[in-house]
Image: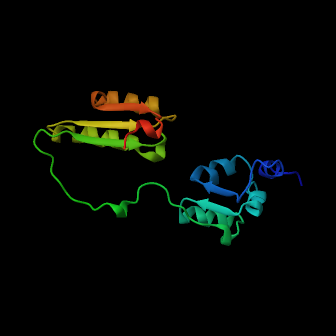
Amino acid sequence: MSESAHEKLRRMGLFTGPLAVYFHAYDLTVWLRERAATAYTALFAEAELLLPISQHWQTRLLELGANAARIRVLHMGVDCQAFSYRPRQLAAAESLQLLSVGRLVEKKGVRFALEALARAKPELPGGFSYHVVGDGPLRPELEALAQRLGISEHVSFHGALPSHECGS
């Protein structure tokens, strides 16, 4: 068996400590479809820690042969439980402010947000601003949709931004 990249780095003294691997959806779907279901076999044997982002992806790792003792689910994103919902009404002239952050691909649903805003526009006397941060293959189509829906003056496509430009 040939030496893996991280084994070479260890041998050269450039990589020390445990190997922890983070798994997102792409890593367990598209990437594997482009290769083989056994593509992670060596990695599963060598990595000390496998970090899927959800229980769903933990199950997928187990199906692929990962050792359950090496898996720890490490959720990412916003912990919705940390925020309490409080209904509110917009003041008469208050503008609705919306933000989406993510890749511009079908499953993110930006198209649905644009369509909903176009429908809601007459009910928003203060107007709205919709900021879309991220990029992807659907960006030109989404920009054209905002134009067709007559809401492009309210929608800003910012493209991909580093986190320090997104504010805090």
Residue 63 vs residue 87, the one in the foreground: 87
Residue 33 x, y percent position in the rendering: 68, 50
Q: Quadrant of the N terminus?
A: bottom right
Quarter where residue 51 is shown: bottom right
Q: Position of residue 83 (x, y in %)?
A: 31, 60
Foreground of the two, 142 or 130: 130
Please determine whether, in this image, residue 35 is positioned above or below residue 153: below
Picture residue at 74% right of the left edge, 54% below the top: 16
View extreme (front): residue = 13
Q: Residue furthest right?
A: 1
Residue 52 is left or right of residue 138, and the answer is right
| Residue 110 drawn at (x, y percent) | 39, 41
Q: Is residue 131 left or right of residue 28?
A: left
As drawn, 68 above or below 115: below
Report the quarter where the C terminus lies: top left
Q: Residue drawn 28% across and 27% down?
A: 153
- For this orientation, the residue located farthest to the bottom is 69
Q: How many marks?
A: 0
Residue drawn where x is 66% and y is 48% of the image: 31
Residue depicted at 84% across the width and 51% down the height = 11
x, y percent for residue 43: 75, 57
